[in-house]
C-alpha cells in the first residue's frame, strides 16, 4: 500500500493561506490563544487540503473538510471529505507539522520532538513490561530516544483506531525500538497484529515519528518536505 507523508514548517499567517479556511476552521483558528498554535493549526489544514487536492484532482480552493467528532459532534475530529477515497491524519510537534494520506483505510500519524526526557513514571505508564525491559541498562539519552520510538508508535495506532487513550498503552507491545516497527501483541480487540502495519519515519532532525495503518498490506511510505 502506497502511503504519502508530507511535512512542513509552520506557515506564516498570510491571506493566501487564511482564505483556504472555511468559517468553522476560521473559528477554530481564532480560538487558539498562542500564535504558535494558530500557525500549527493553519499549516495542518492547508497541508491536508493540498494533499487532498492533488490526490483527488480538485482545485485547492474546492477542498472542504468535515471534521465533526463522532463522539460529541464538535468540529475537532479527523478531517475528511465525505464520499472520497481518502483518509488523512495530521500530527504536529514543535516546528514540524505532518499529514499522512491513504486510500479509505484507517491511518494514524504521530510526530514528537526528540529532546524530551522519559522519566520512570512515564515509562511505567506507557510501556508494556516487555517494552520496558528493552530499555533496561540504557543511559538516559539512549533511554529517552528508545522510549519515544515506542511512544510515537503507540500514538500512531491510537489515532488509527480512533479510540485514543481508551486503549490502555500497556496493553500493546511493539517490536524492539531498534527493529522494524510491528505490533507484536495487543490486549484490546480494536488492534490485531494481523491487520496492523507500522513504519518508523525519518521526519526531520530532532524529531521521532511513526505511522500506523489498519490493513493486511505491506506499507510503502514516501516522505516529502513541502514548501508552498
Image: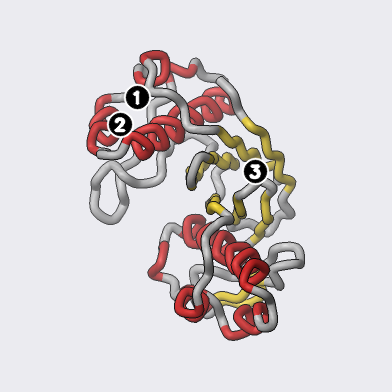
Whole-number angstrom distance, CA of label 1 to CA of label 3: 27 Å
Q: Between residues 112 and 1, which one lies in front from this camera angle? A: 112
Whole-number angstrom distance, CA of label 2 to CA of label 3: 28 Å
Q: At x 24% / y 48%, what residue is drawn?
A: 73
Q: Between residues 92 and 71, which one lies in front from this camera angle? A: 92
Horizontal side, residue 28 vs residue 122: left or right: left
Label 2: which secondary element: helix
| Callout 1–callout 2 Cβ contact below 8 Å | yes
Labelled disc at residue 21: 1
Labelled disc at residue 10: none
Horizontal side, residue 105 vs residue 19: left or right: right
Whole-percent x, y for residue 1 in the image: 70, 46
Whole-percent x, y for residue 70 in the image: 31, 52
Q: At x 45% / y 79%, what residue is drawn?
A: 121
| Callout 2–callout 3 Cβ contact below 8 Å | no
Sequence-first tag of 2 and 3: 2
Q: Which residue is mark 2?
A: 25
Q: Which residue is mark 3?
A: 204
- Depicted 3 relative to depicted 136: above or below: above
Q: Between residues 36 and 75, which one lies in front from this camera angle? A: 36
Q: Quadrant where the C terminus lies?
A: top right
Q: Between residues 138 and 221, which one lies in front from this camera angle? A: 138
Q: Image quadrant of residue 41?
A: top left
Q: At x 43% / y 38%, what residue is drawn?
A: 80
Horizontal side, residue 90 vs residue 66: left or right: right
Dot 3 crowding, Cα within 10 Å, few <14, some 14–19, many 20+? few
Q: Image quadrant of residue 185?
A: bottom right
Amino acid at each position: 500500500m502506497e502511503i504519502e507523508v508530507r511535512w512542513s514548517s509552520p506557515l506564516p499567517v498570510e491571506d493566501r493561506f487564511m482564505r483556504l479556511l472555511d468559517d468553522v476552521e476560521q473559528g477554530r483558528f481564532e480560538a487558539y490563544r498562542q500564535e504558535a498554535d494558530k500557525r500549527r493549526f493553519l499549516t495542518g489544514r492547508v497541508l491536508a487540503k493540498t494533499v487532498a487536492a492533488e490526490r483527488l484532482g480538485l482545485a485547492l480552493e474546492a477542498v472542504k473538510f468535515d471534521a465533526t467528532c463522532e463522539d460529541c459532534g464538535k468540529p475537532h475530529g479527523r478531517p475528511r471529505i465525505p464520499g472520497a477515497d481518502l483518509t488523512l491524519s495530521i500530527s504536529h510537534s514543535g516546528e514540524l507539522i505532518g499529514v499522512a494520506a491513504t486510500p479509505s483505510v484507517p491511518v494514524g500519524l504521530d510526530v514528537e520532538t526528540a529532546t524530551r526526557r522519559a522519566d520512570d513514571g512515564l515509562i511505567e505508564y506507557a510501556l508494556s513490561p516487555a517494552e520496558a525491559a528493552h530499555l533496561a541498562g540504557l543511559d538516559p539519552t539512549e533511554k529517552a530516544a528508545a522510549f519515544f520510538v515506542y511512544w510515537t508508535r503507540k500514538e500512531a495506532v491510537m489515532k488509527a483506531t480512533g479510540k485514543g487513550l481508551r486503549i490502555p498503552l500497556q496493553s500493546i507491545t511493539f517490536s524492539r525500538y531498534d527493529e522494524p516497527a510491528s505490533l507484536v501483541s495487543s490486549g484490546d480487540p480494536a488492534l490485531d497484529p494481523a491487520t496492523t502495519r507500522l513504519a518508523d519515519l525519518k521526519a526531520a532532525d530532532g524529531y521521532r515519528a511513526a505511522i500506523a495503518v489498519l490493513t493486511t498490506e505491506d506499507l510503502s511510505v514516501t516522505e516529502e518536505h513541502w514548501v508552498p
